[in-house]
Image (cartoon, helix red, strand yellow):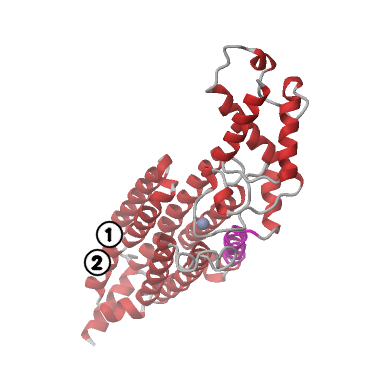
């Protein structure tokens, strides 16, 4: 019966595609030997199962697969080695153009956290957004304490919303990339949090622009804010769907988030038609919005197509892979957007209240 079990275990080992060394194989042998008395890290095979003539053969491989996975976690707990992509368990396989340098499943949140100080395929992804989140925190601190934002609570609210959205997106992303290798369940949960963060950033980016672009048009301002919130919530609901995070839906994810960002074309066309292109580009921050759009589109395209690693598999395993470039583009886009809305805000604040602005607009048209 033990031979039978050993065969089953080896089959499961092959099926789970976990590559183990000879030394590890010897340890697996030890698992078999100690299985009946459960001395070796919580063996899951019941002792009476080994002597049961009516052994449920379907049950055994499931148990063995679990054992191998637990064993792998045990081996890697004290000091893990980076793995090739083909050796990863299926739930950790995402980008098959990154051939080596992947983290194995790690046994605890602590081990996942410690992994941020090691070099692997996720190091760049974690740090690009972690540093981005810290930068946003520092920027918001100085920004919101500027003298002219102290006077109006609305100014603090609209800019604060943007900073909060940007921070939420970047920190959720950094957390996802840090902890997703813990278990399939944690991977799914953090993946959803990451996608929610993207929708929140897009919604939050609209708030200050709509607030200043439609400063004196409360109806348009409210309508567009409701529109973006409804679309953003719809995106969050879609991203809570389990299959949304699978590799097959990569292009779909890029398309959905880009579409959400591009729903801003509706208020942009409205602003352009009511204010004219001169005002839109010189005071409405249109140039900066277009730059932002280009950054998002290029970043999302690289993310969806997995360029450059698709063209040179194995050459961008650690640095300059598409996901890292996408992350960097997101951080740059956040700052480009911030610069744009700052310009728009200072224009609004210099021309005074709505009545003054109206007179000035009329005057400029006559002129
Ligand atoms: Zn990411």
Specify start and end residues of the magenta stretch as a single range: 120-140
Estimate the x, y position of residue 274 in percent, counting from the top left.
23, 71
Which residue is at 52% across, 43% downward? 91
Which disc number belongs to residue 261? none
Q: Nearer the viewer, mark 2 or mark 1?
A: 2
Kindly indicate the quadrant of the structure image that contains residue 32: top right
Residue 72 is at least partly visible in this image:
yes
Estimate the x, y position of residue 153 in percent, counting from the top left.
49, 59
Which disc number belongs to residue 270? 2
Examine the structure image and report whether residue 126 is included in the region drawn in magenta.
yes
Asked whether 114 or 29 is in front, the reply is 29
Mark 2 Cα-neighbour bin, 10 Å: few <14, some 14–19, many ≥20:
few
In this image, 296 relative to 58: left or right?
left
Asked whether 355 or 172 is in front, the reply is 172
Asked whether 308 or 33 is in front, the reply is 33
Which residue is at 75% across, 26% downward? 33
Which residue is at 60% across, 27% downward? 63
Disc 2 + disc 1, Cβ < 8 Å:
yes
Which disc number belongs to residue 220? 1
Estimate the x, y position of residue 222 in percent, counting from the top left.
32, 55
The earlier-in-sequence mark between 2 and 1 is 1
Estimate the x, y position of residue 275 in percent, counting from the top left.
26, 74
In this image, 344 relative to 273: left or right?
right
């Amino acid at each position: 019966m033990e031979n039978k079990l050993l065969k089953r275990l080896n089959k499961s080992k092959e099926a789970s595609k976990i590559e183990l060394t000879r030394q590890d194989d010897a340890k697996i042998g030890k698992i078999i030997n100690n299985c009946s008395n459960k001395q070796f890290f919580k063996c899951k095979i019941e002792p009476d199962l080994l002597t049961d003539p009516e052994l449920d053969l379907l049950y055994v491989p499931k148990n063995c697969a679990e054992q191998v996975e637990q064993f792998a976690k045990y081996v890697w707990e004290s000091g893990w080695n980076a793995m090739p992509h083909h050796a990863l368990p299926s739930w950790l396989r995402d980008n098959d153009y990154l051939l080596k340098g992947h983290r194995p499943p790690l046994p605890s949140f602590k081990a996942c956290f410690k992994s941020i100080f090691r070099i692997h395929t996720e190091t760049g992804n974690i740090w690009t957004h972690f540093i981005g989140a810290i930068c946003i925190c520092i920027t918001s601190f100085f920004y919101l304490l500027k003298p002219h934002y102290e006077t109006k609570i609305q100014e603090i609210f609209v800019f604060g919303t943007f900073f909060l959205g940007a921070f939420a997106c970047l920190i959720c992303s950094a957390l996802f990339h840090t902890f997703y290798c813990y278990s399939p369940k944690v991977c799914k949960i953090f993946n959803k949090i990451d996608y929610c963060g993207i929708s929140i950033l897009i919604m939050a980016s609209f708030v200050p622009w709509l607030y200043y672009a439609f400063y004196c048009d409360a109806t348009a301002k409210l309508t567009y804010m409701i529109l973006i919130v409804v679309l953003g919530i719809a995106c969050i609901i879609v991203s809570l769907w389990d299959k949304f995070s699978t590799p097959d839906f990569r292009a779909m994810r890029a398309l959905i988030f880009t579409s959400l960002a591009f729903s801003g074309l509706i208020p942009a066309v409205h602003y352009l038609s009511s204010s004219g292109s001169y005002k839109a580009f010189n005071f409405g921050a249109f140039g900066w919005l277009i730059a932002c759009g280009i950054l998002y589109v290029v970043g999302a395209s690289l993310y969806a197509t997995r360029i450059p690693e698709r063209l040179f598999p194995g050459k961008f395993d650690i640095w300059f892979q598409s996901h890292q470039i996408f992350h960097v583009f997101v951080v740059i886009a956040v700052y480009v957007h911030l610069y744009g809305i700052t310009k728009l805000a200072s224009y609004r604040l210099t021309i005074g209240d709505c009545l003054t602005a109206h007179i000035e607009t009329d005057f400029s048209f006559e002129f």
